[in-house]
Amino acid sequence: METIIIIDFGSQYTQVIARKVRELGVYAEIFPFRTPAETLIAKSPKGIILSGGPCSVYAENAPHPQWNALDFGVPVLGICYGLQLLAYQNEGEVTKAEHREYGRAELIIDNQDDIFAGVNPRTQVWMSHGDYLTKMPEGFKTIAHSANSPICAIRNTEKRAWGVQFHPEVHHSMEGKKILGNFVRNICKCTENWSADSFIDTAIEKIRAQVGSGEVICALSGGVDSTVLAVLLHKAIGDKLHCLHVDTGLMRLNESQTLMDLFAQNFNMSIEKLDGSELFLSSLAGVSEPEKKRKIIGKSFIDMFEVAASKFNNAKWLAQGTLYPDVIESVSVKGPSAVIKSHHNVGGLPEKMGLKLIEPFRELFKDEVREVGRLLGVPDWFVKRHPFPGPGLGIRILGDITRDKIATLQHADAIYIEEIRNAGLYDQIWQAFAVLLPVRSVGVMGDERTYDCTCALRAVTSVDGMTADFFPMPYDVLSKISNRIVNEVQGINRVVYDTTSKPPGTIEWE
Ligand code: XMP
């Protein structure tokens, strides 16, 4: 497959570059800057993009690859740090700006031959850099400038290398996609051959070849990834697939039933549903410490799964919906979640049960999984659902967990989601959910004094869950949700809205 290689120098936007290139119908893969030249050459890339990064090229720990991208003999595009690296390695010079340039800027294009072909001669771009180019690298010429900086884009026609000081991959760069399109299609001559459709065909062939006559177990969490995975596997291997769903008792209101109905109504697939609520809730009784709760939930899941999966003794494979962002060995600063919370998964289980892992989505981004789902006939309302964490409501009830608290939170959460949907906001939000706090406060209902719990509402926008901004929920919607929760949910007499972004907060409260 025609591939564009993206070298990661630590920019928060590296994954966005890959996604944008793929949206253009061209397969893109990310590699850390330390990757040896031979590994990159072995991929036979059609072009190389050098990402941005937070460092100055002169900084002590600045990421410097062992190769010069100009030696690969394929077109190169350096973005921000990538441009500065091109300069640094090719006798140019970079200087520290007095003020970091951050935000929108007007790019004035001086040459529209290739990378800026068809782009408005004055176009808005997104700048984010502390250094700028003061001496042109060998063989390069300026092709765009701005009011603040005389060099915003450069080109070396002989070496087929381009550098831009701005970030074409972020959506504030109005014509960024056209610029990336010019690079991958016109300059690198890539054809459009990457799509969810083509992925499905090749994935089915690969799955069949990989598992042969072996049987596969797939655990359904109720989330989009595992659901789409099960449907894809079923298409590939039919009844050699065995699906399990463990109802942990910590699901959203009617969640398990919705999942079973989805499969019954849309796909001719049988799912083994196990009621694990007794095991989960008794193991969690009296436990308040977040990490301890997470560990107990993880272990209970493995215990349940092990017993259930032993029924399928011909199974040799365990399917997992691992996505590309989990696979990339990124130098970017990932959010603190990886170290701060032990994520719930089936780690350790495959080895213990002698199962081999099959992970057909290892090269996909979440949006691509959603697209694959749509093409496989998973209904749109399901494909667009917000992510839900493995430990479920267990990490949204602060303090110890009881059946009553679960019922209270399920009710409040259902009202919250219903109102967000009614207001037409659901699809603008990455994740929205209610949290039950062990904080009681005084209120008044009718003429009665109340002394009940607090419910916190969380809604964030995000691209991948690594960073997030709180969603500016309109006041009228908040007011309606708050009124309904306090009036309809017994045990809650106060509602607050969480305005913390990530970082420094995390999305979940535990
Ligand atoms: P945090 O709270 O770390 O969450 O900012 C980032 C994203 O990850 C989800 N999350 C989990 N997903 N198992 C999962 O499958 C987990 O243990 C887990 N913990 C957090 C969270 O919902 C958000 O989308």
Image (spheres, grey):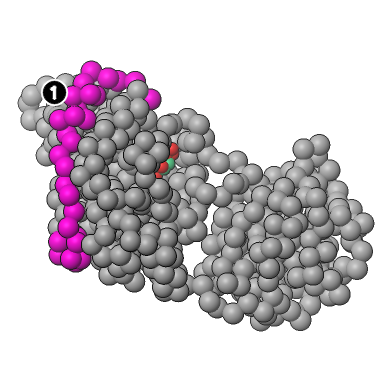
**x and y percent of residue 22 in the render?**
54, 67
Q: Quadrant of ligand 1?
A: top left
- Residue at horizontal 80%, vertical 50%? 66
Residue at 30% from the left image edge and 65% from the top image edge = 237
The location of residue 445, given as percent across then percent down, is 11, 29
Residue hosting label 1: 450
Measuring 75% from the left and 45% from the top, which residue is drawn there?
63
Q: Which residues are magenta?
A: 262-291
Instruction: Specify whether residue 414 is painted magenta.
Output: no
Q: Which of 121 and 332 lies nearest the eye of the viewer?
A: 332
Question: What's under tag 1, amino acid-wise?
Answer: Thr
Residue lying at 56% horizontally and 41% vertically, measured from the top left = 334
In this rendering, does residue 350 appear at all?
A: yes
Left or right of 286 in this view: 167: right
When the figure is inspected, residue 4 is found, relative to residue 68, above or below; the finding is below
| 112 relative to 7, above or below | below
Q: Nearer the viewer, residue 14 or 274?
A: 274
- Residue 285 percent coordinates (x, y): 21, 21
Using the image as rendered, state which of residue 441 and residue 177 is in the foreground: 177
The answer to whether residue 210 is above or below residue 54 is: below
Mark 1 vs ligand 1: CB under 8 Å?
no
